Amino acid sequence: MDELQKKHRQEQRDLQARITQKKKSATKKTRKGVNDECAELERQLKEKQDLEISEINGEQKSNGHPLDNDLDSEDEPSLDVNGNGFGIGIQRTDVSSLQPKDEPARKPNRQKARLARRAAEQESIANQAANEAKELPDLRQQESEAMRTQYTSKGLVEHEIRSDGHCLYAAVADQLTNRKLDLMPILPLHDMDSVPSSSAPPYKITRTIAASYIKNHVDDFLPFLEEPLDDYLHKIQDTGEWGGHLELLALAKAYNVNINVLQSSGQVERIESGTDGSRPALWLSYYHHNFGLGEHYNSLRQVS
C-alpha cells in the first residue's frame, strides 16, 4: 500500500507539472480548451488511482457508494498520462490551486474611445467652420469690384505688378517710367555709386534709392524703426522684404514726386514730397485681400 501511495503522489506531481506548462503556453483563444483538457486529465488520474486503491483493498465501493460502472481498463478508452499505459476515466476532481478563475469580460478600450470622440469633435468643428465660411462675404471679390468702381471714377486703369515682396518698388518704378521720369533721383545722394546700372531690374534701382535716401536722412526715419538701422537698410536694398509707408515716403522725397495710394474704400493716402508738386503724381493701388501674399501694390495709369 505504501508503494502505491508513493506512486500516486509522483503521478500527481507529474500531472501538475504538465498542467502548469500547458496553461503557461495557452493563449486567450486556446485558454478555455486547455482548461477543459487539464480538468479531464485530473479527473482521469483520480479515477485511475481510486480504482487501484479499490483493487488493493478488494473493495467494489468508494466511500460507501457503489461504483457507477464495472471498470475495465481494456474496455474503456484510455489516456496515457505518464507514458505507463494506464487508461483512466473517473469522476472529475476540482483542484482549486490549478483551476483558473473565469476570464473576466473584456474591458472597453478607453484610448480608442477617446480618439473616436476627438475625431468626431474635430469633424463637427470643421463642418461648422465650412458652413460659416459659406455665409461669409467674399472679401476678395468685394475688394476687386470696389477697386474697379474707383478706377472708373478717377479715369485710371490698373497695370498689374507681380505678387512678390518687390511689388511696391516695382509699382513705383513702373509709374516713373510711364510718367517719363528718370529712375535716377532728382536729389543727389552721397552714395550714388551703389545704385545699379540701368540694365538691372527696375525694382532693384528703386530699392537702392529708398535705402540710400534713408541712410542720408537718418534723423527723419530713426524714431520709426523697430530694428538696427544697418539691418533695416540691408532688408530694403538686398532682400525681398515688403515695403510700406516709410519706404514710400523715402521714394517720394528722393524722386521729388507726390505718391497717391488708392484703396477699395475710395480713400486716397497722399504721401507728399514736400516740394512744389510740379512733377506729376504717381498712383498706386493697395489691396488688403486680393493676392496670395496678402497686402499688394499695383500701378495705376491714366486712361489713354
Image: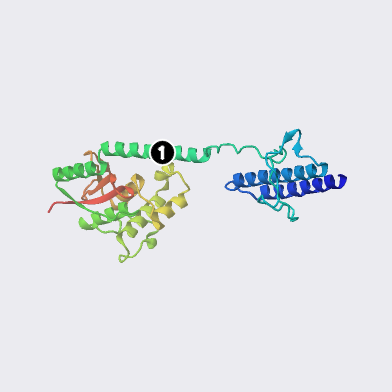
For the question of whether residue 190 can be seen, the reply is no
In the rendered view, would you say 178 is above or below 67?
A: below
**Residue receiving disc 1:** 120
Tally the numbered discs: 1
Identity of the residue furthest to the right in this view: 2
In the rendered view, would you say 17 is above or below 196?
A: above
Classify residue 133 by image quadrant. Answer: top left
Q: Is residue 180 left or right of residue 235?
A: left
Tell me which residue sits at (39%, 56%) in the image.
237
Q: Position of residue 244 (x, y in %)?
A: 34, 46
Judged from the image, the secondary structure of the residue bearing numbered disc 1 is helix
Residue 133 vs residue 32, the one in the foreground: 32
Q: Is residue 124 left or right of residue 174?
A: right
Q: Is residue 162 left or right of residue 124?
A: left
Q: Position of residue 179 (x, y in %)?
A: 20, 55
Residue 99 vs residue 161, the one in the foreground: 99
Identity of the residue furthest to the top in this view: 64
Its colouring scheme is rainbow
Q: Position of residue 100 (x, y in %)?
A: 66, 40
Tell me which residue sits at (14%, 47%) in the image.
155
Q: Position of residue 299 (x, y in %)?
A: 24, 52
Residue type at tag 1: Ala
Q: Residues within 10 Å of mark 1 (few under 14, many from 20)?
A: few
Q: Is residue 171 left or right of residue 100?
A: left
For the question of whether residue 222 can be seen, the reply is yes
Identity of the residue furthest to the left in this view: 304
Residue 204 vs residue 83, the one in the foreground: 83
Tell me which residue sits at (52%, 40%) in the image.
111
Quarter holding the C terminus is: bottom left
Residue 301 vs residue 13, the one in the foreground: 13
Quarter holding the N terminus is: top right
